[in-house]
């Protein structure tokens, strides 16, 4: 006999439908799973065997063949258990149904007692089914119900045990429907430090405001204790709230990474990821034997903060170059190729030398060779991809004792949100929404300069020996500065300010 059920498999953050075909024939007892199944799927044989027996059914003592179609697509994950178990019960005629199961999709890991455990990646599966022209029904573990509740276009049901599924398929007992959950009902807002607490550093505050408005990358350089980390940790507080599309996109990545829980069904706040300097390339960029999203993908629509940038492994820093440019990372393996989004604002901080005092009012104990070796850990191509280079000097005593309150994060956020709205309106007919995403054709159209600005840019370009990439990024930053001031055309002062943020690489690296 033949039993057919449906499930899905993840490729990156996308899901692909998979048909599970179970054939039972007379012969010596055997249980084979074919169709490029991973080790975790082949281990389902023992989980399914015990789950079927402990759910009150008889496991067939004949030859069982399970085919996962399409057979040329690599299958990973333990969520195939539920579809395989039901397929066996249908093929062995222990469960009979008059339902049309062709539009039913199953996902869940089985315990040995037949209970159903939660699995990662449910949200991408639901979003894939939402695009189907038919009216699919998704049956999933109760532990994952909050992920399925984010999508209203799919009829989703939750279950706790294999016996519940069998009873439902036979038409005896209905399953619990998962009600739609609006994103505003999600997690509580976490505490974010306020910019009003930062003493001095007005230039750095303005630069971070520009970075937030246009999603530009920023490098903070200065002596220890100047406030580089303090400033970076306050950047999420001035970023606008995520819209529904951004919430679902970010939550998809966290779902695939298995970082969601019942108390955290979705990611509403913009991520702020701070990997350690000893982190491996696979943990930051993504990858591993079984590809998984890295820190740059977990920072999607948010901030990736690399503290003490020169201390990171050189291979890790060089691997950042392609994602910073393309806003996507592709991980190629012999069995499959996965792509993960990587559209984030990168904030990096560093000291100007090993002791940290070079260029400040304190005595530097480093030799010129030590300073040069330290700075050369940051390659020219990576430095070129940082839109704003900002010096964060030491704060003096009078600034620390100043009792006046600086501008709050909420006030800055309003200004940033207005600038973002201007950009969204400007790019409404294009496939971009932020100034940092502009392509050369967009720069030519939206970054027009007057004669005075043209002359200034030409002089700076020739004198500083800039690259074509630096030229584009200067115009993008100038466009964002103009948007923050709510002016239509880029002014000379906007361009001059943008050029100012590209001068530190000449001071330190070519000084």
Image: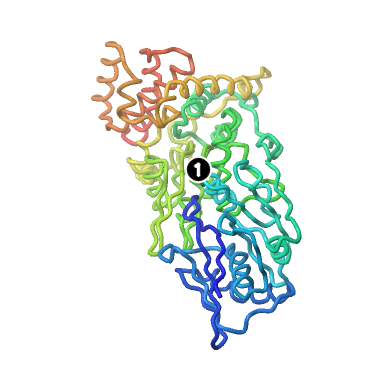
Residue at the extreme front? 98
Q: Which colour scheme is used?
A: rainbow
Label 1: few (<14), some (14–19) or many (≥20) C-alpha neighbours in 10 Å: many
Quadrant of residue 251 in the image?
Answer: top right
Residue 486: percent from left, percent from top:
48, 14
Quadrant of residue 234 in the image?
Answer: top right
Q: Name the residue under label 1.
A: 306
Is 417 situated above or below 339? above
Left or right, 264 with respect to 428, comes to right
Residue 96: percent from left, percent from top:
66, 68
Judge by depth and name the residue closer to the eye, 206 or 59: 59
Residue at 61% from the left image edge and 22% from the top image edge: 399
Left or right, 452 with respect to 75, comes to left
Residue 324: percent from left, percent from top:
40, 41
Is 414 situated above or below 359? above
Residue at 65% from the left image edge and 79% from the top image edge: 59
Judge by depth and name the residue closer to the eye, 407 or 163: 163
Is 160 situated above or below 390? below
Judge by depth and name the residue closer to the eye, 118 or 401: 118
Q: Is mark 1 on a helix, strand or loop?
A: strand
Asked whether the viewer can see residue 254, the reply is no
Asked whether the viewer can see residue 239, the reply is yes
């Amino acid at each position: 006999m033949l039993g057919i059920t449906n499930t899905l498999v993840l490729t990156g953050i996308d899901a692909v439908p998979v048909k599970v075909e179970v054939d039972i024939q007379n012969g010596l007892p055997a249980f084979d799973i074919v169709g490029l199944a991973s080790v975790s799927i082949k281990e389902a044989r023992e989980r399914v065997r015990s789950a079927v027996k402990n759910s009150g059914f008889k496991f067939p003592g004949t030859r069982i063949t399970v085919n996962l179609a399409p057979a040329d697509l690599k299958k990973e994950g333990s969520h195939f258990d539920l579809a395989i178990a039901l397929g066996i019960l249908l093929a062995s005629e222990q469960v009979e149904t008059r339902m049309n199961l062709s539009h039913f999709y199953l996902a869940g890991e089985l315990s040995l007692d037949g209970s159903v455990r939660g699995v990662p990646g449910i949200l991408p599966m639901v979003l894939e089914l939402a695009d189907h022209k038919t009216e699919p029904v998704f049956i999933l573990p109760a532990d994952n119900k909050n992920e399925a509740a984010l999508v209203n276009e799919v009829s989703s049901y939750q279950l706790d045990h294999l016996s519940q599924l069998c009873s439902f398929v036979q038409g005896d007992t209905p399953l619990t429907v998962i009600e739609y959950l609006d994103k505003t009902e999600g997690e509580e807002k976490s505490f974010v430090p306020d910019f009003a607490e930062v003493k001095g550093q007005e230039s750095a505050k303005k630069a971070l405001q520009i970075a937030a408005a246009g999603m530009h990358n920023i490098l903070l350089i200065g002596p220890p204790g100047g406030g580089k980390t303090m400033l970076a940790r306050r950047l999420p507080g001035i970023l606008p709230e995520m819209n529904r599309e951004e919430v679902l996109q970010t939550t998809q990545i966290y779902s695939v990474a298995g970082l969601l829980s019942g108390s955290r069904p979705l990611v509403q706040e913009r991520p702020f990821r701070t990997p350690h300097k000893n982190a491996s390339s696979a943990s930051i960029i993504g990858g591993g034997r079984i590809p998984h999203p890295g820190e740059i993908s977990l920072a999607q629509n948010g901030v990736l903060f690399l503290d003490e940038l020169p201390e990171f492994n050189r291979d890790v820093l060089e691997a950042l170059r392609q994602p910073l440019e393309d806003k996507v990372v592709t991980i190629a393996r012999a069995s499959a190729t996965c792509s993960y989004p990587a559209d984030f604002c990168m904030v990096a901080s560093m000291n100007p030398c090993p002791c940290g005092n070079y260029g400040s009012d304190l005595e530097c104990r480093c030799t010129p060779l030590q300073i040069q070796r330290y700075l050369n850990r940051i390659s020219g191509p990576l430095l070129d991809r940082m839109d704003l280079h900002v010096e964060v000097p030491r704060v003096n005593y009078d600034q620390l004792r100043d009792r006046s309150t600086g501008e709050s994060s909420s006030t800055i956020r309003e200004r940033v949100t207005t600038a973002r709205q201007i950009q969204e309106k400007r790019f409404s007919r294009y496939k971009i929404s932020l100034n940092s995403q502009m392509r050369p054709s967009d720069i030519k159209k939206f970054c027009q300069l007057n004669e005075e600005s043209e002359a200034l840019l030409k002089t700076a370009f020739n004198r500083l020996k800039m690259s074509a990439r630096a030229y584009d990024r200067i115009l993008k930053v100038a466009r964002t500065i103009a948007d923050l001031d709510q002016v239509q055309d880029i002014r000379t002062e906007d361009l001059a300010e943008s050029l100012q943020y590209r001068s530190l690489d000449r001071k330190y690296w070519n000084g």
